[in-house]
Image (cartoon, rainbow, N blue to C red):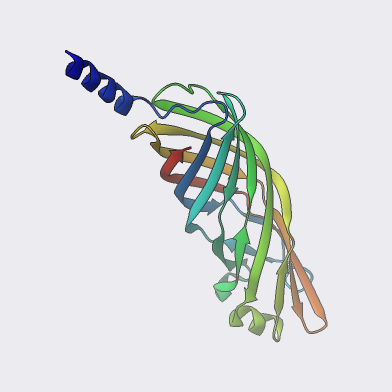
Amino acid sequence: MRATLLSAIAFAAMAAPAAAEQGDFLVRLRGIYVAPQDDSGPVLPAVPTGSVTVDDAIVPELDFTYFFTNNIAAELILATSPHDVAGAGALSALGEIADSMVLPPTLTFQYHFLPDAKFRPYVGAGVNWTIFYDEDAKSSLETALGGPTGVSMDDSFGWAVQAGADFDISERVFLNIDVKYIDIDTTATLTTGAAVNTVEVNIDPIIVGVGLGMRF
């Protein structure tokens, strides 16, 4: 009888949900698909009928979540992604014209609806700061603008929203799915000798992630 009772307790412990509660710290590693919903203005003043588009990317993402209460948590999202920029409109024949790395650290505050369940959906909203680095012009753009061209992109401050859910695998490990929308707007400056052109770009990506998490 004692052995049976101990076995039942051990089974219950293994079957217990990885329920998140006040003071818990979660770490997730996701693979994310970054799909810009981009909208570009003209390239001014040189190509008023030309614009740009931003390509998708697939990269890893790491995030850290802390629970202030059983339902309320804050999540810091860290990832960096490479993006190619292609010409559109009058520049469409040029193909890829530039590329840049994008680092968009994002802090969201979340509400977790079912903290004690095996399936735990949540929603979140917060702020984003996007840093662009390693910007580079391609030869096609330099040929169109008449010489070597430097590219710089302004940092962006915006808002972010998300929705997702955690699914228990074991007492501490869980599967996560997550969808985010981030407001990212920038102005790209193209400097060719003494000539300066600018183009405003709303990148505004939808980010879909799937990964694993662990509760501490």
Name above or below for residue 31 compared with residue 7: below
Of residues 179 and 44, the one nearer the viewer is 179
Of residues 68 and 109, the one nearer the viewer is 68
Check the image and name the residue furthest to the top: 1
Name above or below for residue 77 compared with residue 143: above
- Specify the quadrant that holds the N terminus: top left
Q: Which residue is at 65% across, 71% downward?
A: 135
Q: Which residue is at 24% across, 20% downward?
A: 6
Check the image and name the residue furthest to the bottom: 147
User: In screen coordinates, is 35 left or right of 168?
Assistant: right
Q: Residue 206 location, x and y as percent?
A: 55, 46
Name above or below for residue 55 compared with residue 7: below
Q: Residue 187 location, x and y as percent?
A: 74, 61
Of residues 123 and 195, the one nearer the viewer is 123
Of residues 83 and 26, the one nearer the viewer is 26
User: In screen coordinates, is 39 left or right of 7?
Assistant: right
Specify the quadrant of the image occupied by residue 156.
bottom right
Q: Which residue is at 47% across, 51% downward?
A: 32
- Counting labels gives 0
Name above or below for residue 141 compared with residue 103: below
Q: Which residue is at 48% across, 57% downward?
A: 59
Q: Residue 92 location, x and y as percent?
A: 58, 69
User: In screen coordinates, is 194 left or right of 135?
Assistant: right
Check the image and name the residue furthest to the right: 194
Specify the quadrant of the image occupied by residue 191.
bottom right
Q: Residue 43 location, x and y as percent?
A: 72, 67
